[in-house]
Amino acid sequence: MTVRLAEASDAPAVASVHVQTWRAAYRGLVPDSELESLSVAQRTAMWERAIPRGGVWVGLADDTVAGFCAVGPSSEPDATFQLYALYVLPSAWGTPLGYELARAALGTEQDVVLWVFDENPRARRFYERLGFRADGTVKTETIGGAELTEIRYRLTGAAA
C-alpha cells in the first residue's frame, strides 16, 4: 500500500473510485436513479481540474488507485481546514488504506471539519476513530429528490 499526492494522470482512476464508492456506500440512502446516473467521464473532468490545485491524495493497492482523499481550506467560516472527500473501494474497507490517506492528507492540521451523512454509520465510526467529533452543526442536502441530513464533524488537535 502506497499513499502519495495525486498526479494529473490519476484523474480517471480517482473518478472511477469516486463513482464506485458512491454506488456502494450510498445504496439505499441516495436514490438509485442518482447513483446510476453518476458518470466516470464527468467525474474525470472534475478531477482533472481539481488535482492540479493540490490537496488530493491517492492510496494505491498493488499499484492501482484504490482510494483518494481531498482536503483544503475550509468553506466554513469558523474552521481553517476541511476534509472534502475520502473514499476507498469496498475491497479496501476494513484495511488501513483510509486511515493512511487521512493521516497523509491531514498532516498536522489542528482544526479540520468535514460533513458526513447522518445515516452513514460506517463513515461516522471511521471519522470518530480518527478523533473527529460531531460539533452540533447540521444541514440538509437534496440529492435526486431525497433530503439527506448531514452532520458536521470537527477535529481539534493533530490527526491520529
Image: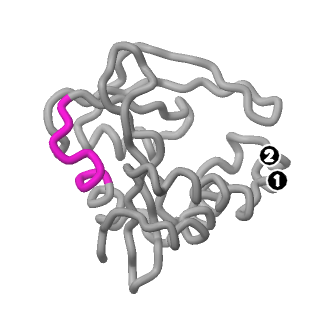
Span shown in magenta? 102-110
Q: Which residue is mark 1?
A: 37
**Relative to 60, residue 44 above or below:** above
Three-letter amino acid code at disc 2?
Answer: Glu
**Are the residues tagged 1 and 2 within 8 Å (C-beta)?**
yes
Locate residue 52 relative to residue 155 in the image: left or right: right
Locate residue 64 relative to residue 2 in the image: left or right: right
**Relative to 157, residue 64 above or below:** below
* Residue 129 percent location from the top left of the image: 26, 43
Q: Quadrant of the N terminus?
A: bottom left
Q: Which residue is mark 2?
A: 34
Three-letter amino acid code at disc 1?
Answer: Ser
The residue positioned 41% from the left and 64% from the top of the image is 6
Locate residue 78 relative to residue 157 in the image: left or right: right
The residue positioned 41% from the left and 32% from the top of the image is 114
Quick one: label 2, few (<14), some, or many (20+) residues within 10 Å? some
Q: Spatial distance from mark 1 to mark 2, Cα to Cα?
A: 5 Å
The residue positioned 47% from the left and 73% from the top of the image is 65
Label disc, if present, on residue 148 of the rendered structure: none
Locate residue 114 relative to residue 31 in the image: left or right: left
* Residue 159 percent location from the top left of the image: 19, 42
